[in-house]
Image (cartoon, rainbow, N blue to C red):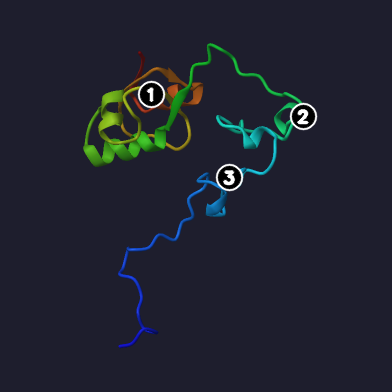
Amino acid sequence: MNLSNLKPAEGATKTRKRIGRGPGSGRGGTSTRGHKGAKSRSGYSRKTGFEGGQMPLQRRLPKFGFNPLNRVEYKAINIETLQVLADSLKIEKISPEVLVNAGLISRKHLVKILGRGTLSAKLEVEAHAFSKSAEQAITSAGGTAVKL
């Protein structure tokens, strides 16, 4: 070992240069912020979508569409899914609680039964809404469709 091999211990030196600590530090004066302008001031935070005063993209594009205030959103479940549930769980009554336990919906969802697939099991189905084809398929299989 000689003087050319010496180096400071691990963690003894800092690699980051501290800014705003006077002109002798090499990062004094404007403290790497440049001269004037909003970005040089304290408290500056760039707003989302700000384009330097140019009209932002979200204001240049036209508005479109319509979102009704009182829209009721349903979670759609097809009768083929009900048939699979009836076969696997061997049940005759399907309610939202059964669908929650099966992991198909969460408690807050409203359920609408749709008519895709075929239904052979005689089921009593409780749901918030039914399509005409689903209601017809359930009644033709000998079951009942109960609206909650």
Mark closer to the observer (1, 3):
3
Residue at 38% across / 23% down in the picture? Answer: 109
Could you say where residue 98 lies in the image, as x and y percent from the top left? Answer: 26, 29
Q: Secondary structure at mark 2?
A: loop
Q: Quadrant of residue 34?
A: top right
Find the residue positioned furthest to the bottom: 1
Q: Quadrant of residue 120?
A: top left
Q: Secondary structure at mark 3?
A: loop
* Foreground pick, 71 / 77: 71
Residue at 40% across / 37% down in the picture? Answer: 80
Q: Amino acid at mark 2?
A: Met
Could you say where residue 111 lies in the image, as x and y percent from the top left? Answer: 40, 23
Q: Which residue is mark 1?
A: 109
Q: Quadrant of residue 35?
A: top right
Q: Secondary structure at mark 1?
A: loop
Residue at 73% across / 23% down in the picture? Answer: 63
Please give left or right for residue 27 compared with residue 9 in the image.
right
Q: Which residue is mark 3?
A: 31
Q: Which residue is mark 2?
A: 55
- Badge 3: residue crowd in 10 Å (few <14, some 14–19, many ≥20): some
Q: How much space separates mark 2 and mark 3, taking CA atoms?
A: 30 Å
Relative to residue 54, is residue 88 depicted above or below? below
Q: How much space separates mark 1 and mark 3, taking CA atoms?
A: 54 Å
Mark closer to the observer (2, 3):
3
* Foreground pick, 88 / 137: 88
Please give left or right for residue 2 compared with residue 91 in the image.
right
Residue at 48% across / 35% down in the picture? Answer: 116
Q: Amino acid at mark 3?
A: Ser
Task: Check residue 63 in the rendering and tell me which mark sits there, or answer none.
Answer: none
Mark sitting earlier along the chain (2/3):
3
Q: How much space separates mark 2 and mark 1, taking CA atoms?
A: 40 Å
